[in-house]
Amino acid sequence: MTPLTTAQAERLLLYVARSPDDDLAAHLKSRGWNISIARSTHDVARLARPDATCAGIVDLTSFAARDIAGLESALRQQQIGWIALANNERLADPEVRRLIRHYCFDYVKIPVANATIDYLVGHAYGMVTLCDLDFVAGVATAGDDEMVGTCEAMQQLFRTIRKVANTDATVFISGESGTGKELTALAIHERSQRRKSTFVPINCGAIPHHLLQSELFGYERGAFTGANQRKIGRVEAADGGTLFLDEIGDLPLESQASLLRFLQEGKIERLGGHESIPVDVRIISATHVDLEAAMRDGRFRADLFHRLCVLRVDEPPLRARGKDIEILAHHILHKFKTDSARKIRGFTPSAIEAMYNYNWPGNVRELINRVRRAIVMAENKLISAEDLDLEHFTAQQTMTLAQAREAAEKRAIESALLRHRHRLNEAATDLGISRVTLYRLMGAHGLRDASASDEKTLFGGEAEGRE
């Protein structure tokens, strides 16, 4: 069996069955379908390519009942338009009905006429080709870089990017350092109506405070010593496009007031000038700083925050992205493998295990750095845990069942909180526990800063029903 290619000269079709129907396969080939046959979920994973849309037929009657649940990972591949073949016995199974409802465009009871199957797979193929392949495949291209992810948290992020790109409202991106906030901002810009205009990024924390005003709004000749000619600021340079204000939490109060005035009026004044200049720009901001705490401390203006945070996007930390860690590592290896003269083919099992056990405080940026360093320093064709400098996170440090359960519980809570933007009631419902239990587990796993007032409010009953 040959993996599906991206060539679209023929329509691609993946036929999944323990015992494929040779007559059906021959009919579909005669109708111009380029068929690949998979007899297991392993075959599906090997044959399907994320960069190629195709139709899919899954014969649920040919799999034993105990194997049905294992098909979900195959059906979850959204670049494939699935049609299910079933019978009355299979349709009586709630799990089968759930899989069809969630992942298939349609289903038919067998036996069925070949012409009907041909029509249905053509419809499924046509529908799936309308999708944005980058997002469906878990890869969002942003300039020369990519956002890679197949976990639910990343799929939710991709869906959010699609939605906010269709509006012109301000966007606030929240997330830890190294999670890829600028890539998200660029992905939003490149899917918006402003994509043909400029994307201008500025790191508010990297520019000295006394220069930030002139960087943002520009200046006129003679505005200060050394101002020998007019300079256009970043806001004006982004006219018609998108301005990305990274690390907005480091913006000094003086600049916050000027930015707020611009957001309210849509006009700027260059330093040393008196002319009000209208500027049409979309603002996307981001920070790893807790702006709610900064507002309480008087370090960030609440009125500016509400102007910037009309739409909010939450970046998931790498430790909450499960299987994506391994997918990203292979993606980085493929991208940078030419850094080494030695042909690096992949990772040892111990390296993969260590990557899952490590907490990744530097998130994706740290993963990129570790893999790139390992590509250069590795002495074998497979990168080891030692090459990643993660040898202390392998099975040599045995993990008890209780520790494994605790780690899985923490990841589940983090993912639920991220999906529901830390709305405890909704996260608790998603996890199937009470809000009080969730709050207690957050404290046990170090996911909140408990205070006496928090405890009193929560357990005194006042907060049980509200955020």
Image: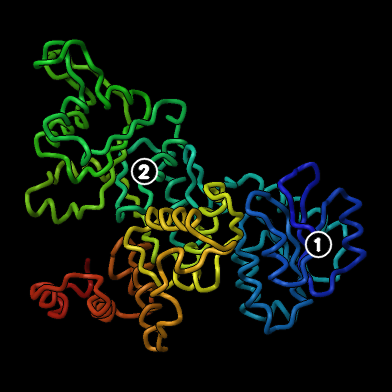
State the separation of the CA atoms marked 2 and 1.
40 Å
Amino acid at pointer 2: Glu
How many C-alpha atoms fall within 10 Å of the one at disc 2: few (<14), some, or many (≥20)?
Answer: some
Q: Quadrant of residue 413?
A: bottom left
> Which residue in the structure is indicated by mark 2?
182
Looking at the image, residue 283 lies above or below residue 44: above
Could you tell me if residue 430 is visible in this image? no
Q: Residue at x 69, y 71 (%)?
A: 41
How many C-alpha atoms fall within 10 Å of the one at disc 1: few (<14), some, or many (≥20)?
Answer: few
Name the residue nearer the viewer: 209 or 142.
209
Q: Helix, strand, or loop for circle 2?
A: helix
Numbered circle sitting on residue 1: 1
- Whole-percent x and y of residue 316? 37, 59
Numbered circle sitting on residue 144: none
Q: Residue at x 79, y 41 (%)?
A: 9
Looking at the image, residue 336 lies above or below residue 83: above
- Whole-percent x and y of residue 407? 37, 78
Residue extending furthest toward the front: 379
